[in-house]
Image (cartoon, grey):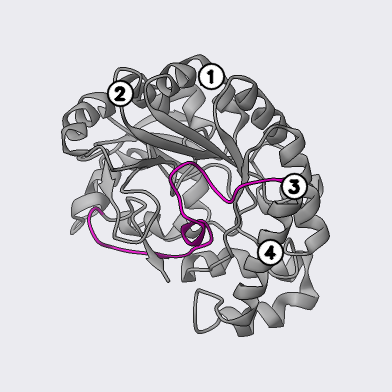
Amino acid sequence: MLFGDSPLPGLAGIARLAAQSEVLESKRTVRYFEIDCRSVLNRTRPGLPFTWTINPYRGCEFACRYCYARYTHEFMELHESHEFEDRIYAKSNLPPILRRELKRVRATDSIAIGTATDPYQPAERRFLRTRSLLEVFAGQSGLSLSITTKSDLIRRDIPLLRSIASRNRLSVNVTITTLDASLARALEPRAPRPDLRLQTVRALTDAGIPTGVFPNPVMPLITDQEARLDALAKAAREHGASYFGGGLLFLMPSSRRVFLPFVEQHFPHLLRRYQERYESDAYLKGPYRDMLRERLRAIRQRHGLASGGTHVSEEQRFPLFESSQAGLPGAGILRHVP
């Protein structure tokens, strides 16, 4: 039971499952729970570069200030901002469910792992939920898979990833928002340093696994400067990356409650601009978006980088994403906004 208490009266669905979850382990500030899993593969809506998503964990210990997925904890009646990174739920019984659900996957479908929460966050060291899924994929053939992570822990699974890649299409997206270690620590307090992520890009590419860097999200007036993005693309290329993404920051209400205080603390001169631009809409559109797209396109061309993995069109590699409550609440289902 959550915190040893009985489930709150009136809870239903995912909120009741969360309240009934068994405590797996606790650290000083983080508690890990196991939550029943009803489905592993979650279908996306049309317009995304992938057909299915998988997120082995609910919540993410990396505590990124901009994370859009914070809203998913609200489905479990967890509304405090810190609970997203301090209450981590490992999904149970994943391999048999995945084996069953893979029968629905067509040859033209693609599966993205880690669209909402990082599949290699610290919980993975203990509970191996992502690895258990990869072991299932290693026995498949003809699938199209991608993994997105900020963690160097993925290096642990390189032999398994090579096995998967030998029979399926696989690419790995390593998210690096900035090369500035101090800024990265402020933005992503518990995530691995940028240099460790670059070393991970090199290790993956040396193993023959197609790998790229996602500088996501690109934050206006914080990480969007051409010099910053160019330096990051150059480092990505030098470490073997074959593509370089670029998705613009968007702020759900749950994200604004965390990100705007971060801006106030570290970039107080930008606070009013962010408040004005994101007050009525989670997405930035219009000339700024067009400018950033062109900037990234020029940077990629300069360094000989593609714009995304093996099965994604350029327009899909520079999306604005909108969360959806369709399907299982908080399952990381996304809708592309053209």
**Cα gap from disc 4 to disc 1, whole angstroms:** 35 Å
Q: CA distance from mark 4 to mark 2?
A: 44 Å
Q: Nearer the viewer, mark 3 or mark 2?
A: 3
Amino acid, disc 2: Ser
Left or right: residue 155 versus residue 236 is: left
- In the image, taking residue 1 as reference, residue 238 lies left or right, namely right
Evaluate if marks 4 and 1 touch, with contact meaning CB atoms under 8 Å apart: no
Residue, x 30% and y 54% (percent of image)? 44
Q: Is residue 59 magenta?
A: no
Per the model, the C-alpha gap separating discs 3 and 4 is: 32 Å
Q: Residue at x 19, y 52 (%)?
A: 13
Q: Give the residue at mark 1.
A: 158
**Disc on res. 303:** 3
Cβ–Cβ under 8 Å for marks 1 and 3 = no
Q: Position of residue 308 (x, y in %)?
A: 54, 48
Camera-side mark, 4 or 1: 1
> Where on the picture, by quarter, is residue 290?
bottom right
Foreground disc of the pair 4, 2: 2
* Side of 211 relative to 227 (left or right): left
Whole-angstrom CA distance, mark 3 to mark 2, is 33 Å
Q: Secondary structure at mark 4?
A: helix
Q: From the image, which quarter does the N terminus lie in? A: top left
Question: Residue at image x 80%, y 56%?
Answer: 228
- In terms of depth relative to the viewer, which is nearer, 321 or 4? 321
Say which residue label 2 marks: 141
- Neighbor class of circle 2 (other Cα within 10 Å; few <14, some 14-19, many 20+) is some
Question: Residue tagged by mark 4?
Answer: 262
Number of residue marks: 4
Lower sequence index among marks 1 and 3? 1
